[in-house]
Amino acid sequence: MLTLITIAATGIIILYTTFFKSRKLLVPIAITGALTALAFNISDWNTNQLLFNNMMKIDNYSVAFNSVMILSLILILLLSHQYFKGVDKNVSEIYSLLFFSFTGACLLTSFNNFTMLFIGIETMSIPLYVLAGSKKFSIRSNEASFKYFIMGSFATAIFLLGVALVYGVTGSFNMSEVSEYISATAKISSLMKLGILFIVISIGFKIAAAPFHFWAPDVYEGSPTLVTTYMATVVKVAGIAALLRLLTGCFIGAAAEWQHILEAFIILSFVIGNFGAIQQQSVKRMLAYSSISHTGFMLLAIIAINQFSASSLLYYSLSYSLATIAAFAVLILVKNYKNSDASYESFNGLAKHNPFLAFVMLTAMLSMTGIPITAGFFAKYYVFLASVKSGYSWLVICAIIAALVGVAYYFRIIINMYYKESNSEKIIKDNYFVISLIIATAITLAVGILPQFIIGLI
Amino acid sequence: MDNITTAIKLIPLEHYVFLCFALFSIGVFGILFRRNTIVMLMCIELMLNSVNLLFTAFSAYRSDAAGQVFVFFIMVVAAVEVAVGLSILVMMKRNVNSVDVNLLNKLKN
């Protein structure tokens, strides 16, 4: 609970720093808050508390996912100092909105009641609608914000209809009571099936799983890149963690009903994510499509629903978040330096004058593809292992093909960086930025070499 | 309170469910086919309120207050969403001087 309070309080404190006109203090305060939250979060390890009248359940699952998300948040905050350098107005509001949104993300990993799940989704999404539009005078940012808002509200309404139907059938919002009801009844009623369908679809909207992905490329492209990074990492991980918690804690008895939906999600995410990514000329859009394809891989861990699901999903979330943050960070630098639309060509010859940046991008791309010694390899390996154990070999074969197709667009950046010539110069980056890049790359490599640290946790 | 729940129970539960689905579908079609963003916001409100009605009906039929408490949460969130949605619209109106959704087509491949 202290984690949640710290995160929310940090958001409020940051809001008040506007009065002191102390721009320099913003990032240190934010990072101190996040680190304190991380410490409180880790101190909850192995405690298993039920809070707020059984509405929240802090267990190792939520602590582990919270830690991954707080790590992502810290890395994003480190990037933000340079990113907001040119912006002179309302920067502290952006930071506090990030923290308020993060409060919702923490609720999503530890809910034990549909009310809490609903509040978590909304607390996470509503600040994001504002953040997506935080470039007030850019029409593209407005468009991204509006699209995200309409799609998010639409998904919320569908989610609520699903919860209403589940409530109508079971008469409870509590996850364990709903789970007991499902295991006690021999035949699941059609209203219940419809409710489960609606709930899974609405979370599919939030995590941008195909066929409910269509907002994602536009929103990712139009939003400020830092917000996109947050959306692609923290929001997606929180949504996926919530989905696994919901399906194991609540709908495990009705697995046959939602596994078919997830099968469709996975196959479509692979197809649309990969073929969408190949066609893109803009790296930002490519990363958006590739995140759809990664959603497919993460859903693969959920569909398996066995004792390996949680740990393989945790590992995948960590490796995916780190690689995505590193990739977006380099993209921010290249995009600002060239003042371009972030096409593949702007990466030409990056290795010659910026070997560090090129190396960071190389590790990120290798990790996303799933090449050994980066975290991405074992991430995919454990996810495949989990789903093979549950008899989804055919899905794993599709996933391997999808991973191979991924080589096409990830390696295109690597080839452009290392084998193409251009007259680029050294890109200036501040210390915070370098620290963030080093942490992301180091953890990617360390976890890739020693996967048992993470995989044995939960 | 008791006579309200008995009054609600005078109408069969199925009727409430059908009414809510009808209202919800009107909201969905409104979002899909109307081009005015303010009407789209209203359609979202319609969807959320149809769910509220469903919660109230279920809650009354089960004599369980939890469903009605949930309605309060939905109302608060709906109010917040409208506040954010309208401010996004104001921002759009300032930039392009229109609230037509067809003008939002700058982000394409």
Image (cartoon, coloured by chain):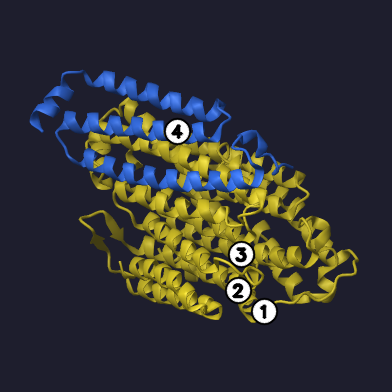
Chain colours: A yellow, B blue
- Rendering coords of residue A419 (x, y %): 87, 65
Residue A17 spot, x, y in % from top left:
46, 75
Q: CA distance from mark 1 to mark 2?
A: 8 Å
Q: Are marks 4 and 1 on the same chain?
A: no
Q: Which residue is mark 3?
A: A325
Q: Say the numbered circle drawn on residue A81.
A: 2
Q: Amino acid at mark 2?
A: His
Towards the viewer: A102 or A265: A102
Q: Looking at the image, which residue is at 38% across and 53% down?
A: A120
Chain to which the residue tagged by mark 2 belongs:
A
Give the Cα distance between marks 2 and 4.
39 Å
Q: CA distance from mark 3 to mark 1?
A: 16 Å
Camera-side residue of A210 and A140? A140
Q: Are marks 2 and 4 on the same chain?
A: no
Disc 1 target residue: A430
Tell me which amino acid carries mark 4.
Met
SS assignment at label 2: helix
Say whether disc 3 or disc 1 marks the residue closer to the N-terminus.
3
